[in-house]
């Protein structure tokens, strides 16, 4: 096999965890910076260091696949929300990118878990209600995919404690998801300072790329079975409000299932019940204490409280 010819740099920063916390929102804005390179396709996260069958393709494959379009940008990065919570990722990252900087976007743990759950419903991967999904979480975990890991991905203290075995706090910037939405300019200045590039004083804020709630989960599952691997990209096109959905329609049956999916979306997002939220807040209490103890004074936000309303 001939060696891949490399023509770009490996990343010097990574936008990571947590899932469903606003990393797409941040990435879209940073892509507008002339001195920051990020892969243009928001639909796909590399997940190179967390998914073994991708990691086994080698660092040259990773570089050529994701960074071959890089030009003269000073900051080179990618977005993979799995790196913060997949235990395999930090050691692999340390081996290949020891000086890389991390931007971890973190959200209210209970509401993050519920947002991830709604996304799995949208993807046609989840059929249980949220209470059932939480109860069955441990028994349903897949070592590589972890689609049903809702509480686990919100254990920021546990994840950070492990991450700090490989990287110092000085290489990590924590961004509060709620603040990112309401104080976007201030948080972007923190990010550009961290990346050592000029501030992004003019930028366009787009949709927050929400996961719409669905009326009937069975519809999503049937559509996923019909479209196969393409279904994920259809969902991402809906979330990112792209106008190319017709590219997935090749037959009358495709048209039928696409129509089913679109008509199955709700205009408003389902809210997390106060009862479940209260229970999850108690579940995350000790882990939050661990997280805030580990980060000490390097963050600009306080512990999440039960009345946080970012969803």
Image (tube, rainbow, N blue to C red):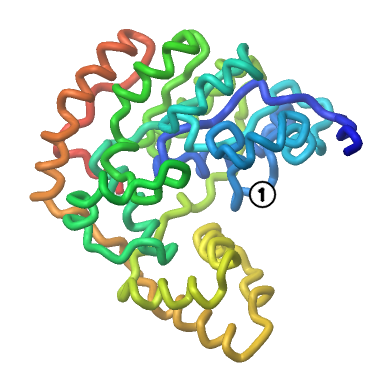
Q: Is 62 on the left-hand or right-hand side of 284?
A: right
What kind of element bears circle 1?
Answer: loop
The answer to whether residue 122 is above or below residue 136 is: below
Whether residue 29 is visible, yes or no, is: no
Q: Is 238 on the left-hand or right-hand side of 87?
A: right
Return the residue nearer the eye: 22 or 154: 154
- Residue at 43% across / 11% down in the picture? 165
Image location of residue 243, percent across then percent down: 63, 69
Q: Quadrant of residue 10?
A: top right
Image location of residue 127, percent across then percent down: 30, 66
- Residue at 55% across / 39% down in the picture? 51
Whether residue 49 is visible, yes or no, is: yes
Image location of residue 215, percent across then percent down: 31, 74
Mark 1 neighbour class, 10 Å CA radius: few under 14, some 14 to 19, many 20 or more: few
Which residue carries the number 1 mark? 41
Q: Is 233 on the left-hand or right-hand side of 74?
A: left
- Residue at 35% across / 16% down in the picture? 161
């Amino acid at each position: 096999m001939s060696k891949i010819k490399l023509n770009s740099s490996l990343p010097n920063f990574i936008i990571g965890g947590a899932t469903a916390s606003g990393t797409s929102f941040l990435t879209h804005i940073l892509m507008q910076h002339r001195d920051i390179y990020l892969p243009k396709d928001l639909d796909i996260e590399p997940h190179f260091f967390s998914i073994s069958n991708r990691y086994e393709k080698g660092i040259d494959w990773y570089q050529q696949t994701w960074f071959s379009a890089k030009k003269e940008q000073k900051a080179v990065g990618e977005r993979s929300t799995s790196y913060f919570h997949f235990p395999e990722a930090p050691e692999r990252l340390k081996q290949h990118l020891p000086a890389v900087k991390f931007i971890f976007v973190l959200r209210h743990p209970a509401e993050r878990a519920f947002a991830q759950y709604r996304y799995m419903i949208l993807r046609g991967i989840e059929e249980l209600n949220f209470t059932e999904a939480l109860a069955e979480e441990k028994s349903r975990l897949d070592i590589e995919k972890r689609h049903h890991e809702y509480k686990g991905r919100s254990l920021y203290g546990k994840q950070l404690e492990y991450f700090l075995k490989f990287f110092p706090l000085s290489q990590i910037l924590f961004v509060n998801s709620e603040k990112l939405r309401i104080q976007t300019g201030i948080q972007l200045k923190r990010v550009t300072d961290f990346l050592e590039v000029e501030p992004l004083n003019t930028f366009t804020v787009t949709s927050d790329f929400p996961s719409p709630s669905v009326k009937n989960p069975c519809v999503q599952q049937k559509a996923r079975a019909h479209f196969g691997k393409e279904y994920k990209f259809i969902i991402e096109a809906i979330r990112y409000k792209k106008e190319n959905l017709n590219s997935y329609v090749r037959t009358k049956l495709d048209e039928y299932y696409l129509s089913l999916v679109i008509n199955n979306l709700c205009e408003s997002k389902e809210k997390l019940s106060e009862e479940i939220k209260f229970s999850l807040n108690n579940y995350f209490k000790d882990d939050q204490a661990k997280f805030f103890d580990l980060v000490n004074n390097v963050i600009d936000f306080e512990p999440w409280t039960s009345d946080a309303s970012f969803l």
